[in-house]
Image (spheres, rainbow, N blue to C red):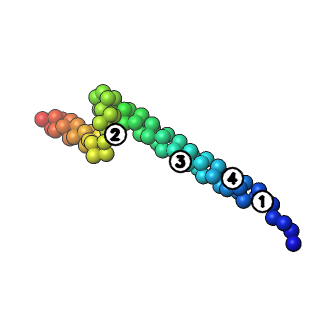
Amino acid sequence: MSAQNPYVAPRAAVGDALSAAIGEIGIFAAYAAIFVISIMLTIQRSHDFNTTGRLAIPGLVPLVNLVFRAIPAYMQYVKRAEQRK
Protein backbone atom coordinates (compact mmCIF):
# COMPACT_ATOMS: atom_id res chain seq x y z
CA MET A 1 0.00 0.00 0.00
CA SER A 2 1.16 3.44 -0.80
CA ALA A 3 0.48 6.32 1.48
CA GLN A 4 -1.53 9.17 0.03
CA ASN A 5 -0.02 12.57 -0.04
CA PRO A 6 -2.11 14.91 2.16
CA TYR A 7 -1.34 17.87 -0.10
CA VAL A 8 -2.95 16.44 -3.23
CA ALA A 9 -6.52 17.38 -2.38
CA PRO A 10 -5.81 21.01 -1.41
CA ARG A 11 -3.79 21.53 -4.60
CA ALA A 12 -6.64 20.14 -6.64
CA ALA A 13 -9.06 22.43 -4.85
CA VAL A 14 -6.83 25.44 -5.52
CA GLY A 15 -6.56 24.45 -9.18
CA ASP A 16 -10.32 24.10 -9.48
CA ALA A 17 -10.91 27.45 -7.80
CA LEU A 18 -8.30 29.11 -10.00
CA SER A 19 -9.79 27.72 -13.20
CA ALA A 20 -13.28 28.77 -12.07
CA ALA A 21 -12.02 32.29 -11.33
CA ILE A 22 -10.31 32.52 -14.72
CA GLY A 23 -13.51 31.33 -16.39
CA GLU A 24 -15.60 33.93 -14.57
CA ILE A 25 -13.15 36.68 -15.49
CA GLY A 26 -13.28 35.55 -19.11
CA ILE A 27 -17.08 35.60 -19.15
CA PHE A 28 -17.11 39.06 -17.55
CA ALA A 29 -14.61 40.32 -20.14
CA ALA A 30 -16.74 38.92 -22.96
CA TYR A 31 -19.91 40.55 -21.61
CA ALA A 32 -18.07 43.86 -21.13
CA ALA A 33 -16.76 43.72 -24.70
CA ILE A 34 -20.23 42.98 -26.08
CA PHE A 35 -21.67 45.85 -24.03
CA VAL A 36 -19.08 48.36 -25.26
CA ILE A 37 -19.45 47.25 -28.88
CA SER A 38 -23.23 47.50 -28.69
CA ILE A 39 -22.99 51.05 -27.34
CA MET A 40 -20.57 51.98 -30.11
CA LEU A 41 -22.85 50.53 -32.77
CA THR A 42 -25.85 52.32 -31.28
CA ILE A 43 -24.02 55.64 -31.44
CA GLN A 44 -23.00 54.93 -35.02
CA ARG A 45 -26.58 54.01 -35.91
CA SER A 46 -27.89 57.23 -34.38
CA HIS A 47 -25.39 59.19 -36.46
CA ASP A 48 -26.66 57.35 -39.55
CA PHE A 49 -30.08 58.95 -39.14
CA ASN A 50 -28.64 62.37 -38.27
CA THR A 51 -29.25 62.48 -34.54
CA THR A 52 -26.88 62.85 -31.65
CA GLY A 53 -25.02 59.93 -30.15
CA ARG A 54 -26.50 60.79 -26.77
CA LEU A 55 -29.52 58.75 -27.78
CA ALA A 56 -27.44 55.70 -26.89
CA ILE A 57 -27.99 56.45 -23.20
CA PRO A 58 -31.75 55.77 -23.15
CA GLY A 59 -31.00 52.82 -25.41
CA LEU A 60 -29.64 51.03 -22.37
CA VAL A 61 -33.21 50.47 -21.25
CA PRO A 62 -34.34 47.30 -23.04
CA LEU A 63 -37.74 48.47 -24.32
CA VAL A 64 -36.47 51.90 -25.30
CA ASN A 65 -33.87 50.18 -27.44
CA LEU A 66 -36.66 49.20 -29.84
CA VAL A 67 -36.88 52.87 -30.83
CA PHE A 68 -33.58 52.50 -32.67
CA ARG A 69 -35.23 49.93 -34.90
CA ALA A 70 -38.36 52.01 -35.45
CA ILE A 71 -36.80 55.41 -36.23
CA PRO A 72 -34.94 54.39 -39.43
CA ALA A 73 -38.02 52.59 -40.75
CA TYR A 74 -40.21 55.60 -40.02
CA MET A 75 -37.73 57.99 -41.65
CA GLN A 76 -37.64 55.79 -44.73
CA TYR A 77 -41.44 55.83 -44.82
CA VAL A 78 -41.48 59.64 -44.60
CA LYS A 79 -38.84 59.92 -47.31
CA ARG A 80 -40.86 57.72 -49.68
CA ALA A 81 -44.03 59.69 -48.90
CA GLU A 82 -42.25 62.93 -49.79
CA GLN A 83 -41.01 61.45 -53.07
CA ARG A 84 -44.57 60.51 -54.05
CA LYS A 85 -45.76 64.13 -53.75
Hey, which quadrant is residue 82 in on the image?
Answer: top left
Q: Residue furthest left?
A: 85
**Residue at point 42%, 34% (across, down):** 40
- Pointers 3 and 1 in contact (C-beta within 8 Å): no
Placement of 1 over or under 17, stated as above or below: below
Marks 4 and 2 sit apart, C-alpha to C-alpha, by 38 Å
Residue 38 position in % (x across, y down): 41, 39
* Earlier residue among tags 3 and 1: 1
Of labels 2 and 3, earlier in sequence is 3
**What amino acid type is highlighted by mark number 3?**
Ile
Identity, as a three-letter code, of the amino acid under mark 1: Pro
Q: Residues within 10 Å of mark 2 (few under 14, many from 20)?
A: some
Q: Which residue is mark 2?
A: 60
Name the residue at 81% across, 64% down.
4
Mark nearest the camera among 4 and 2 is 4
Label 4: state its secondary structure: helix
Q: Residues within 10 Å of mark 1 (few under 14, many from 20)?
A: few
Q: Compute the Cα span from label 1 to label 4.
A: 15 Å
- Disc 2, disc 3: CB below 8 Å? no
- Mark 2–mark 3 distance (CA, rounded to whole Å): 20 Å
Image quadrant where one finds the N terminus? bottom right
Q: Quadrant of residue 43?
A: top left
Circle number at residue 6: 1
The residue wearing badge 3 is 27
Task: Using the numbered discs, state the Cα–Cα distance from disc 4 to disc 3 in whole angstroms.
Answer: 18 Å
- Residue bearing mark 4: 15
* First in residue order: circle 4 vs circle 2: 4
How far, Cα to Cα, is label 3 from label 1? 33 Å
Q: Check disc 4 and give the amino acid type.
A: Gly
